[in-house]
């Protein structure tokens, strides 16, 4: 009589597989709960950094070009008929248009800094052309900008206008049309511009990231 063979003990029973899977899922859930807050914090920091960088780049450009307002190359040639004036073209509490060779191109242009639903814009165009003072015609310098404001001061650091009750439009001029210079009392007095820019990045189901920049600019060519 032949001895009966023992059945193979290789493999796992269904109960053992279910227990192993349950343990693995518990471990995976624990790892996820540890990793998820760190990942959320990292993404939040990256969004905030992106908002800050875009805001800084835009602010640096604005400051650099406002500082050069009134730099007219035409005023230094032999023909006085080419001379230009009025470096500050339009100045309100939410928009500023200036003129001169602000970008080193060798020619004078008008530059409007403003904000609309798309973000912070810069319009560059011919001086005296209405399109050069219309915000929608500009290039986007920074998206997600929720606020842009300007304040103006004279050589003695007195506010212009005085008192500075916003909203205000120096000499009654506003964006959307070419400025007139029948009266230039307030615009000609501007020697210092204070800029405030606020950017906000909104992501669904995440806290919004807000960043505010302030700059103080003195005009070099009054």
Image (cartoon, rainbow, N blue to C red):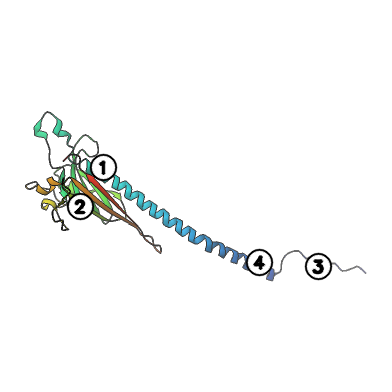
SS of the residue at dot 2? strand
The numbered mark, 4 or 2, whose residue comes first in the sequence reads 4
x, y percent for residue 69: 19, 41
**Callout in the foreground (1, 3):** 1
**Callout in the foreground (1, 4):** 1
| Residue on which the image places disc 1 | 64
The numbered mark, 1 or 4, whose residue comes first in the sequence reads 4
Residue contact between numbered discs 4 and 2, judged by CB atoms under 8 Å: no
Vertical comparison of 152 with 126: above or below: below
The numbered mark, 1 or 3, whose residue comes first in the sequence reads 3
**Callout in the foreground (2, 3):** 2
Q: Residue at x 32, y 46 (%)?
A: 57
Residue contact between numbered discs 1 and 2, judged by CB atoms under 8 Å: no
x, y percent for residue 137: 22, 49
The numbered mark, 4 or 3, whose residue comes first in the sequence reads 3
| Residue on which the image places disc 4 | 20
| Residue on which the image places disc 3 | 7
Q: CA distance from mark 1 to mark 3?
A: 86 Å
SS of the residue at dot 4? helix
| Residue on which the image places disc 2 | 151
| Mark 2, other Cα within 10 Å: few <14 / some 14–19 / many ≥20 | many
The numbered mark, 1 or 2, whose residue comes first in the sequence reads 1
């Amino acid at each position: 009589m032949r001895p009966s063979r023992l059945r193979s003990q290789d493999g796992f029973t269904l109960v053992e597989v279910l227990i192993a899977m349950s343990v693995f899922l518990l471990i995976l859930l624990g790892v996820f709960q540890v990793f998820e807050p760190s990942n959320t914090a990292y993404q939040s920091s990256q969004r905030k950094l992106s908002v800050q960088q875009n805001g800084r780049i835009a602010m640096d450009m604005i400051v650099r070009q406002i500082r050069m307002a009134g730099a007219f190359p035409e005023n230094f040639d032999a023909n006085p008929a080419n001379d230009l004036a009025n470096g500050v073209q339009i100045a309100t509490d939410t928009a500023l248009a200036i003129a001169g060779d602000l970008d080193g191109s060798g020619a004078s242009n008008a530059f409007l800094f403003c904000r609309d639903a798309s973000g912070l814009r810069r319009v560059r165009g011919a001086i005296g052309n209405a399109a050069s003072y219309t915000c929608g015609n500009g290039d986007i310098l920074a998206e997600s900008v929720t606020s842009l404001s300007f304040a103006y001061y004279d050589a003695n650091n007195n506010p212009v206008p005085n008192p500075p009750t916003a909203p205000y439009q120096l000499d009654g001029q506003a964006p959307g049309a070419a400025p007139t210079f029948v009266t230039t009392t307030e615009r000609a007095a501007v020697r210092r511009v204070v800029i405030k820019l606020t950017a906000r990045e909104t992501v669904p189901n995440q806290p919004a990231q807000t960043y505010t920049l302030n700059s103080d600019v003195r005009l070099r060519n009054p």
